[in-house]
Amino acid sequence: MILVNRAVSTTLDNIAWFSRIRTMNRKIHSTLSSSSSKPDSLRIQHPRSEDSNPETANGASGSLETRVYTRKKRLKQEALEPLEKKSQLCGLPDIEEFAFKKNTRSSRRSTETNITVASAKTTAGTSFLKLLCFFTHSNCLRINLVVLNLGNPPENWVEVLEGIRQMRSSGDAPVDSMGCDKAGSFLPPSERRFAVLLGSLLSSQTKDQVNNAAIHRLHQKGLLTPEAIDKADESTIKELIYPVGFYARKATYMKKIAKICLEKYNGDIPSSLDDLLALPGIGPKMAHLILHIAWNDVQGICVDTHVHRICNRLGWVSRPATKQKTSSPEETRVALQQWLPKEEWVAINPLLVGFGQTICTPLRPRCEACSVAKLCPAAFKEASSSPSSKLKKSKQSKEL
DNA sequence: GTCCGGGCCG
DNA sequence: CGGCCCGGAC
């Protein structure tokens, strides 16, 4: 069985291969519509003959006989992805998106094959039309037709990233000693994931050591499972996690999340972005983090204030059609995802967080200690400002 | 003493 | 949007 998926994300309006997608989608469409309710078979040909890209060669050759299942398009509930909206306006036919729902969990990317069908360079950057093929755990071959748009990456970003990596490899930042990724690494999968979720919840707005200790105390009391949290007193949880910021709120969230996990997810944690976001106390930053760590699934970049601040200092992100800094982490996330290759999406967070803790600090960044300062537009410029100007009524006249 | 932070709530 | 939670870093 083969599942066909189209995931489109692009900022480009008029690229030649849009017509290719249209053609392919029409093919799929007509195949589907002629098949009444039953799934039908479909031939997808590799356009290798007209494709000069060497990557094409790594796929299976010839054609694939496939069965196609689709499902009706999911309702878009948020308007935050201008890219997707735009692509919808381009008049692409609605081949539905096959989203893996419940019961489809971990490790589905192990056998992924990445075939570039076409690529195009434009003033807006480079875009690829790719076929991503992989077997799911239930032995379905899943095919994703993906339009990847790499917007114009900033000059020298590779060099900058490499420089930061080197700075980070020597002096170690707090984030290295303990991220929530270590939480419960000794536990069975489902419990480990729950522990990861708790760790993420606690760790934000909190120093890592404090969070580490809190997790440790919870573990000692056997409170790393949804069942245990559900039964435990909220006040008990409060006391155990106490030194973390917002402990009262977080204890409440933990109770609610545990209950939801038990009732809706059979004691596991949600595996989709949307379902994670629906949990109380879980916003975009933590949802992406949890998806990375617990499910090894990369839907987006985990952008916290460090990533937000540093990307803006480096001039890596800006508001659409302007050169202004992005004003929120969410905006930064979308902008960053437009050009940063997906391979870096997971690594970028710990990298920049650590960098932000040690060198590119919010206040008075240590540009003199930064090896990539010469490539940084903001180097030696900021005495007291960061992306969000936060001088309300202050008398910030002293201090440098 | 003031500001910070992720997410929620009004 | 801006206030709120809460401890800790300036």
Image (cartoon, coloured by chain):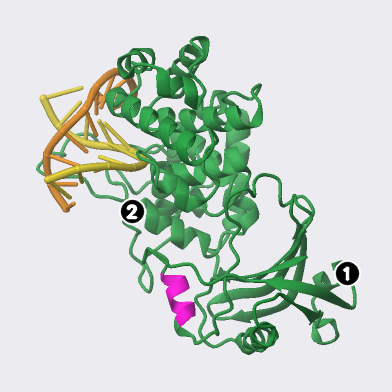
Chain colours: A green, B yellow, C orange
Q: Quadrant of residue A53?
A: bottom right
Which chain letter matches label 1? A
Q: For numbered disc 2, what is the local secondary structure?
A: loop
Dots 2 and 1 on the same chain:
yes
Queried whether the magenta region covers residue A84, the answer comes back as: yes
Q: Position of residue A325 (x, y in %)?
A: 34, 59
Q: Classify A53 as above or below A393.
A: below
Which residue is at 33% across, 17% downward? A238
Residue A67 in view, yes or no: yes
Q: Which residue is mark 2?
A: A328
Q: Classify A99 as above or below A356.
A: below
Q: Position of residue A285 (x, y in %)?
A: 43, 45
Q: Amino acid at mark 2?
A: Ser
Name the residue furthest top. Answer: A220
Which residue is at 82% across, 79% downward? A46
Which disc is residue A60 wearing?
A: 1
